[in-house]
Image: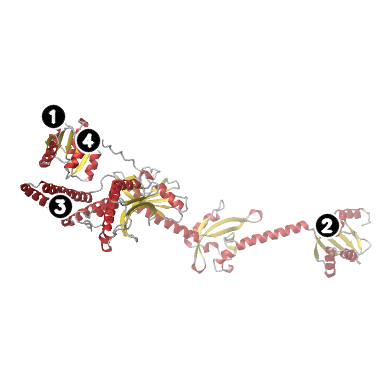
Amino acid sequence: MLHDRDPISAALHDAFASFGEGVLLLDADDGILAFNPAFERAWDLFGMPLVRSLTFFENLEAAAALGRAPADAWLAHRRAATGAECCLLGTAGGTTLSISETQTQGGRRMIVCRDITADRAREIALKENEYRYRLLVETITEGVIVLDRDRHIVFANPRFISWFGGSDMALLGRPFTDLVLPDSRQRLDPLFSPTLPRSVEVPLACGGGEVRFVLISAAPLRGVGGVPSGQFAIITDVTQLRLATERLRQSEARFRGIIENTPFGILSLDAAGAVVTVNPAFRAIVGLGQGAIVPEDATDWLPDAEPALPAMMARLAADPGLAAVNGTSRLKRSAELGHARIVLSRIGEIGRGFLLIVEDITEQRQMEEALRHASKLALLGEMSASLAHEISQPLNVIRLSAESALLSLDDGDAEAIRAKFETIGAQSDRLRETIDYMQAFSRRDAGPQKSFAIGTAVDAALALMAPQCSGLDIALVCEKPEAVLVALGHRRQLEQVLINLLRNAVDAIVERRTLQPGPPDRITVALTATTGRDGRRIARIDVSDTGTGIRPEDMPHLFDPFFTRKTEGVGTGLGLSISLGLMTGMGGRITAENRKDGGCRFRVVLPLSDQPVDEEPPARPEPEPTPTAAGTMPAMTILVADDEPLAAQEIAAFLKRDGHVAITVGSGKSARAALEANHVDILITDLQMPDGDGLQLIAETAAEYPHIGIVVITGQPLRDRVALAELESGVDAILRKPVSLRELKTTLRRLV
């Protein structure tokens, strides 16, 4: 310690003691002269006291011998040091000391020890920050440049340099505006606005003639005192984004053009099926004005979609691999109901929405129907020769039998006369069957299609054929699922088709018995549900038999009109042709094949419907026959209205023979006059008559004389009988011309 006590020495002593840095004074021989408290605190970091009787070098050696690493490092530095070099020492506690030695006058040495731990930490942090910022600038995917106050480039990062050939020598010092295409340089003005700079997009003329579209964001740089010194800019390459955006814009324009100009109606639906948008073509199809509000429910326009729209959406949601679902529907248009073909597909991922394409096929359906009808008429013309044969044959038999009966009158042979007239009756039935087939073949479909249970039609056909099969000892087996399968069409037509197939099966089995007796006689009707090739659900009805099968040479002509292998008089050859036409009208088909174990299989295929079964009006109960004594009927007054006098006279003579009072008239007006003048029990009427037709007469009679039974004798096609049955009161019986007197008598018994 210093021992001078004069005022100056005292002041120096106080300054020396309070100095914040450690100071050690050594003599020329490295002996310790003095040290202040700060140096003493620094030496305490070595974990041992500073011995004044030893030289400082010896103190360091002692500390180094005790394993004090900083002391060992200080020794090495002192041995190697020349002049006033500094060294840094790190202690075990994390403190960093800066050591410097200087030589004073008189050969003394002064060691200054300064704690630079905080300064060192700040320096390291600064370097680390600088490294991070440099790493960010060097590796960032955007271009980074620094401009001086004259907007010349003074710095560019590697990303920006790579756009211009990879060398900064071609960029540094250049005006930034020189890099921008001339037509776009004025866009840079907002970038250097002194108030609020904003991002701009410009094209850069890069190396090799390449043009890059970039988005530039700039910020001002300021020097000492806030004086502007330049600009810092981040440049993002948006070339690919711009190209993708342009491609997307062009794609949207093309897609919008397709949507706007396509002749098909297009609707976008949300995930719940609500309508979001409709295109102009759909508005035109349904007559929806441009400013009209679009209903949210597509079923407002498509009331009878098959399959139903919810079912189509459910199928798409359940099967991610299914691209689209096809269907048909009635179409509500401004003027009338039409027909539409519909296609439903997904928009994007499952659950995002649906795209519904609607094609108006009303005119197509009408044209197809007209063509079908025209083709039927043309075919009827081509079949005239076959038809003439089918009609001339029974007519020839009738004429021959009638003349033979007349000749037998001279001989008085009553049995021969009876046989001739029975032949005439049988041939008349054959004529009626041919006429029925021809009317069914030539008429258009009657009435709108309705949804019906297919199993009900199968049961009805089986019930009709069961007695005949039982009488012939043919097993009739039915296989069908418990679930109700529904089709859209005419149930009676399907029954007619199945009955025809069952009759053919019976005939084939009976024919086989004569050729190969022994195998089991069996007809199987199997109803199943499956999926067609187009993904739609279908019903399949297989009618299999153990009959003779189909000759290979006959297979191509199986559905041709008048083609038959049956014995003459047994069939007309029109059954399969008519059946195929009926099923085609319901959207189905019929195929045939031979079975491996004998016999053949006819397959009827119909599309299934998701609609509920339409309720059919209950059949009008037929009155039970009233028992009479000895099987006779009470005498009645019967009015016969027919514009064919001979037919009316024969019916009247037959009725009078049974004890009835018969009144004959030839027109609707005469019939109404007769009803007013007489108490009539039963009216027998034709449909087509002069001076008031039969339909009008039936309606007025049912309304004014409800007690009168009404029997219709008609030769009109089924569509008129359907219209007749839909009258409010209905009729009691319908008989087909040519009518049988025995059939008429049985009908009258039921009405008594």
Tell me which amino acid carries mark 3: Pro
Q: CA distance from mark 2 to mark 1?
A: 149 Å
Sequence-wise first label, 3 or 2: 2
Sequence-wise first label, 3 or 4: 3
Using a 10 Å C-alpha cutoff, classify the residue at mark 1 as few (fewer than 14 neighbours), some (14 to 19) or many (20 or more). few
Which residue is identified by label 1?
Answer: 677
Q: Nearer the viewer, mark 1 or mark 4?
A: 4
The quadrant of the rendering that contains the N terminus is bottom right
Q: Are marks 2 and 4 in contact (CB under 8 Å)?
A: no
Which residue is identified by label 3?
Answer: 394
Which residue is identified by label 2?
Answer: 21
Which secondary structure, mark 3?
helix
Which residue is identified by label 4?
Answer: 751
Relative to 298, residue 191 above or below = below
Q: CA distance from mark 3 to mark 4?
A: 33 Å
Q: CA distance from mark 1 to mark 3?
A: 42 Å
